[in-house]
Amino acid sequence: MTEERCRFGHLRCRETRKPTVFAPPVHFFLCPVCGRTSMTMGEEPGGHICCGQPSRLLVPREAEDWGRELRLSYQIVGSLNENAVLAQWQSAGEGEQPEWIWLGTFSGGQMKYIRQGTKPPAVFGLAGADAYAYCDKDPCVQCTFRCKRGFGLYFYFRKRGLLYLPLDRMSTRQQGL
């Protein structure tokens, strides 16, 4: 490893062990009147009100419920000093894309709103404990350490609702390890 790659950058995780998820769970809601989505963090979803009406709790659906015409995926890029999650979507439906994507991380999360016509991927830059990386492979080889296990991507589609993709993929072939 070169000296350049060994230096600690501003975004590099300083943890010596893989962090555990310490952020509270996130809950998403849909207003039945105006159609706005909102979120809260905490153990209990509680009664969320918008436009004077109780909002409906959005329950995320997992991969087997998406159907064949939609493909969601991710890639972890970067190395020890700078890494990111690339959230990708591909749909057979013309112009179908998420309205927003939430990346849940060890310490909280990030929201990206997707402008109509935007092409994938959505890039989530990581820093601090969320940037923990076991190695300096770029892109991630999805080894048994699964540095981002505990992270999850929530994709919100107006027609499909809330879809969840955990970042727990592990390759059967671990290239170069």
Image (cartoon, rainbow, N blue to C red):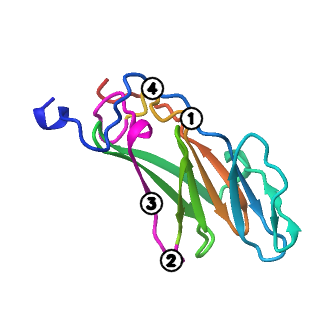
Tell me which amino acid carries mark 3: Pro
Badge 4 is on which residue? 18
Under circle 3, the secondary element is: loop
Under circle 4, the secondary element is: loop
Tell me which amino acid carries mark 4: Lys
Query: Which of the two discs, 4 and 2, labels the residue nearer the N terminus?
Result: 4
Q: Distance between the residues labelled 2 and 3?
A: 12 Å
The answer to whether 54 appears left or right of 138 in the picture is: right
Nearest the eye: 119 or 59: 59
Residue under the image location 66 percent in, 55 percent down: 68
**Residue 161 against residue 20 in the figure, above or below:** below
Which label number is shown at residue 117?
2
Q: How far apart are marks 3 and 1 (CA)?
A: 21 Å
Query: Which of the two discs, 3 and 1, labels the residue nearer the N terminus?
Result: 3
Residue 118 among those drawn in magenta: yes
Residue 98 in the image: state x and y as whole percent: 60, 65
Q: How far apart are marks 4 and 2 (CA)?
A: 37 Å
Residue 100 in the image: state x and y as whole percent: 59, 64
Q: Distance between the residues labelled 3 and 4?
A: 26 Å
Label 1 crowd (10 A; few <14 / some 14-19 / many >=20)? some
Label 4 crowd (10 A; few <14 / some 14-19 / many >=20)? some
Under circle 1, the secondary element is: loop
The answer to whether 110 appears left or right of 40 in the picture is: left
Residue stretch rendered in magenta on the structure = 115-140
Residue under the image location 82 percent in, 64 percent down: 49
